[in-house]
Amino acid sequence: MPRITSCLLDGKPTTTAEALELREDARRREVDAPQFRCDECTYPVEAHKDGMTGGKAHFEHMDENPQCPYMQD
Ligand SMILES: [Zn+2]
């Protein structure tokens, strides 16, 4: 499955770095995290940080969407 490396926030393209920063900022201010959406299918996605195993930061669908191009092999 291809990695999702950009998303939409209020309809604007957002990178993983920006998304993680915005989420951290929301956490610090104790407000709800922004709702990021898949830039292909607009389903909600969640930002994941760089993995311990060397995986790059990316977004993952919170719910599977078989119609989404990112969900295709
Ligand atoms: Zn999608």
Image: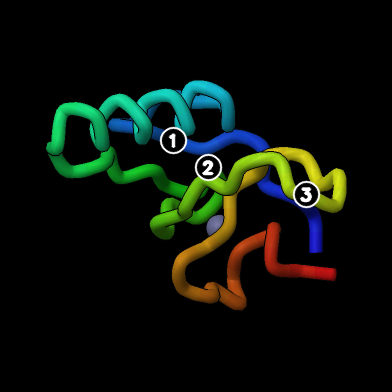
Mark before the other along the chain sequence, 1 or 2: 1
Task: Indicate the amino acid at tag 1.
Answer: Leu
Q: Quadrant of residue 27?
A: top left
Mark 3 or 2, which is nearer the eye? 3
> In the figure, is residue 38 to the left or right of 68?
left
Q: Is residue 59 above or below residue 70?
A: above
What residue is at 26 percent from the left and 41 percent from the top? 33
CA distance for labels 3 and 1 = 26 Å
Q: Amino acid at mark 2?
A: Asp
Q: Is mark 2 within 8 Å of ligand 1?
A: yes
Question: In the rendered view, does 59 fall on the left or right side of 22?
Answer: right
* Vertical arrangement, residue 18 with respect to residue 73, above or below: above
Kind of element beneath mark 2: loop
Percent across and percent down for residue 71 are 69, 67
Disc 1 to disc 2: CB gap under 8 Å: yes
Q: Residue at label 1?
A: 8
- Which of these two is toward me, 32 or 8? 32
